[in-house]
Image (cartoon, helix red, strand yellow):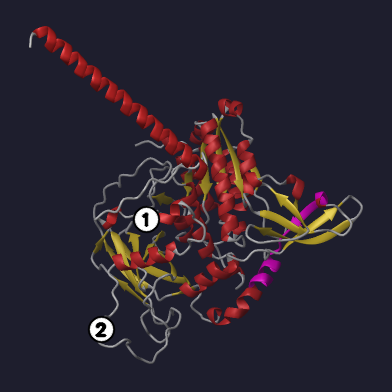
Amino acid sequence: MDIKEMTVKRAGLKLDLFRKVIFLLIVTVIVVFVMQLQSSVLIKPDIEAPSPHLQSESSKDIDPLPYSRYNRFGMEWITIVDELNWQQRHGYAENKNTETPFDIGNGSLGLTSTMTTRVMLHNTNVQKGEFVHVVIEARDKNNRRRNRGGDFFMAVMQNTKLGKSTAGRVIDYANGTYSVYFYAAWAGKAEVTVQLAFTREIINFIRQVVKTKEKLQGIAGNFTDGVTTESSNCSMISEGLWSDKCEYMNANSMGKTVLVCDRPSTLECSQLNIIGRSVQQMNKITADQMQGAADLFESISQMAWLPATPVLIQDAEVYPRPLQQCGSDIPVPLSDGYWETRELFIPLVCHSKQWSKEEVHRCLSDKTIIASGDSTVKQIVRLMRYEHAYNMRFHFMAPRAGQIDETVPEFVFESDLIDNITYNECQSKVPIVMLNFGFHYGMWSTQSYIERLFRAKLAVERLLKRCPNSKVMIKLSHPREHVFREQSIHSSNWVFFDQNRIIRYVFAGIGVLFLDIWDMVLSSFETNTVHMPPVVISQEIHLMLSYICPEMVGA
């Protein structure tokens, strides 16, 4: 075969290969088109089709929740599985008996009792700058060890003579044993006090009874046309049915939660003028709920302190702790900080400082602070005006719980407030938005509460996209006094602690700043109340400013 024939043959082979490639491409396009055509009938265009899950020999590659990709409703049981996994990871093991079907006995298991629960110092040789480790072993009134966690403990380590104090970080191992860690910020004597705020059983009552019931908030509605006035019963409802009621909806701020009122006999639904929700009415509703579980609330364990544990801290040279700049999504540390004196709190969450009036004005000269929240936020507004001559814009959250009736047409919801911040305003001054979802939400169902948070989150995301230079800060709740037994249920410290956890979870990862003052208030030498005195509010402001202008804090 000569060179000419070889060349022709090679060209023919290339042509055949080219034709085959074209044919395969055409077939592939047709197959893909048919598959897309079929899937478009089964799957909506705006929903991503789940990819097939292949079996793997490794359990780590197996999706434990395959149906969660299709439906998320009714999966509260996940928390039970998570608690059991947490318990097992921390070394909990039941006694094994394989010879008989049961371990047979005669006994009782009661609520955790402060009379028998033990607090033990785990490390006795502690130096300044290290952590004091205390172990709590929960026991019932019969001195029987509790084999489950969930009790809500709060702990403080203080030296009242030196004026030094810090709160402890409680770790629940879900097996009746708890660790508490305190930062040893000083040398010398200290005293650890642990409070059993709520037992697991009371918390379950709050979760399963109080926080799931709707139509129970006891809101009074007042209708008027300027001449005639009528009263009506109202409720906030997210889950539930109703018939022939006046409905007041704000999907942008409250999601599916609706304010529902009985229809007035002569006036129109549009003539709702005032709503109010008294503490006395909230207490009455809660008292009715508590009647079916009176045995839980007869115990002296609720809000009781365990015997104090003395600690001796050895002196040592302490080097400054490296702290990151105050910003968003900072991990919760083992210690939030300590009171160096009765007037000065040293945060260990991030790098902060005490601000002078001149520094405050430099920090805020190109900014405007817009606040929406409760009266604890208003305390900050007032002290900023009094101590630093700075005026913050403030709007009360709505609806509120308390003795003051609220005028409905004047309601300002936080999501609407945020959406009304325009691009041009952002160019004029940097908006700093402060939000608060605390004490007035105690009686809200968990569903309605999360709905409102989620709508606020969407508004925050829109703001940060519209005005990337803006900042959003959420002031979290702090422990307060329990005045009435009923109030200690519907507006308890556990409820507010849990709300803080929910807020962090909902707003995580979008750039929100969390002003967490729980440990600051808990460990202060002032009585824990809703409205803390100026000495505490002042320290809240210094931490707040360190988040707003972290670049001014220095090294």
Residue 307, by quadrant, is bottom left
Residue found 44% across the figure and 60% down from its top: 523
Along the line of sight, which residue is nearer the eye, 74 or 325? 74
Query: Magenta stretch: residue 283 in it?
Result: yes
Check disc 2 and report the residue beneath it. 98
Residue found 41% across the figure and 43% down from its top: 352
Along the line of sight, which residue is nearer the eye, 17 or 192? 17
Q: Secondary structure at mark 2?
A: loop
Say whether disc 1 or disc 2 marks the residue closer to the N-terminus: 2
Along the line of sight, which residue is nearer the eye, 528 or 105? 105
Percent from the top left, x then y, of residue 84?
A: 36, 68
Residue found 26% across the figure and 84% down from its top: 97
Task: Tell me: 330 left or right of 274.
Answer: left
Label for residue 335?
Answer: 1
Q: Secondary structure at mark 1?
A: loop
Percent from the top left, x then y, of residue 90?
A: 29, 66
The magenta region covers 270-286
Task: Tell me: 13 left or right of 136.
Answer: left
Pick out the residue farthest to the bottom: 106
Task: Tell me: 73 left or right of 115.
Answer: right
On screen, 127 above or below 344?
below
Does residue 392 appear in this view?
no
Q: Which quadrant of the rendered structure holds the C terminus?
A: top left
Tag 2: residue type?
Answer: Thr
Does residue 234 appear in this view?
yes
On screen, 496 above or below 465?
below
Q: Which of labels 1 and 2 is toward the front?
A: 2
Query: Magenta stretch: residue 321 in it?
Result: no
